[in-house]
Amino acid sequence: MINLKFKIKNLKLELTMRKIILFASLIAICIAVTPLNTFAQSPKDSYLIGNGDILEIVTWKEPDFSREEIIVRLDGKLSFPLLDDVMAAGKTPTQLKLDIQDGLKAYVSEPHVTVTVRSAASKRFYILGEVVRTGEYPLTKKLTVLQAFALAGGFTEWASKKEIILFRRHQGQEKVIRIDYKDILKGKDFSQNVEIQADDTIVVP
């Protein structure tokens, strides 16, 4: 009886170690296959502001020229004190910051502005099926398929990891990209670790 309990304990320990090794392998591959410029740039340098996004704009030591929440309108512009309508859509937060700073120079000595995306309403992607956390996710920076799975908490025990499908709308056409997670994990085909685009839907059967 004692010998049986010892075997069960060893089996549980072995399964736990396998899970740890698998998770570590996933993290290592995410780092290995992510382009260097992803780490060289912060999300604010790569994300393009879109209609419906909610921004926080702070001018240092100038509360009159600071706003906790500003919504980018459907025309791509936002309203800002003394500057009236400022075009925001299609720009990175850094580009918008520089534009606002230039506009404020007529009213503030050496303005220092920060722009933060509080809610990325304009760019989303979706993960459905056998993952821990299904749903809608904001796309605020460059993201690969493996990184998307990590955001979703990984797979359930019933997931069919060799038959994952990514649906993408491209030039008015629905494009289907088939993904074999195990091939990526084993290093057989890194090309399947594609970069996520806005409105992508990943289905894990």
Image (cartoon, helix red, strand yellow):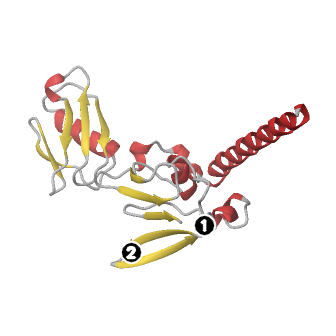
Q: Residue 15 or 32: which is nearer the viewer?
A: 15
Residue lying farthest top?
61
Residue 54: % across, % down: 24, 43
Please tell me whether residue 146 is drawn above or below residue 63 in the rendered image. below
In this picture, residue 47 sits left or right of residue 113: right
Residue 39: % across, % down: 55, 44
Q: Residue at x 40, y 58 (%)?
A: 125
Name the residue type under label 1.
Gln
The residue that mark 1 highlights is 192
Element assignment for label 1: helix
Name the residue type under label 2.
His
The residue that mark 2 highlights is 170
Residue 79: % across, % down: 12, 43
In this picture, residue 143 sits left or right of residue 97: right
Which numbered disc flags the more N-terminal residue, 2 or 1? Answer: 2
Element assignment for label 2: strand
- Mark 1 neighbour density, 10 Å: few (under 14) some (14–19) many (20 or more): some
Q: Residue at x 43, y 62 (%)?
A: 197
Please tell me whether residue 117 is drawn above or below residue 109 in the rendered image. below
Q: Residue 153 or 205: which is nearer the viewer?
A: 205
Residue lying farthest bottom?
173
* Image disc number at residue 122: none
Residue lying farthest right?
3
Please tell me whether residue 182 is drawn above or below residue 35 in the rendered image. below
Residue 182: % across, % down: 68, 62
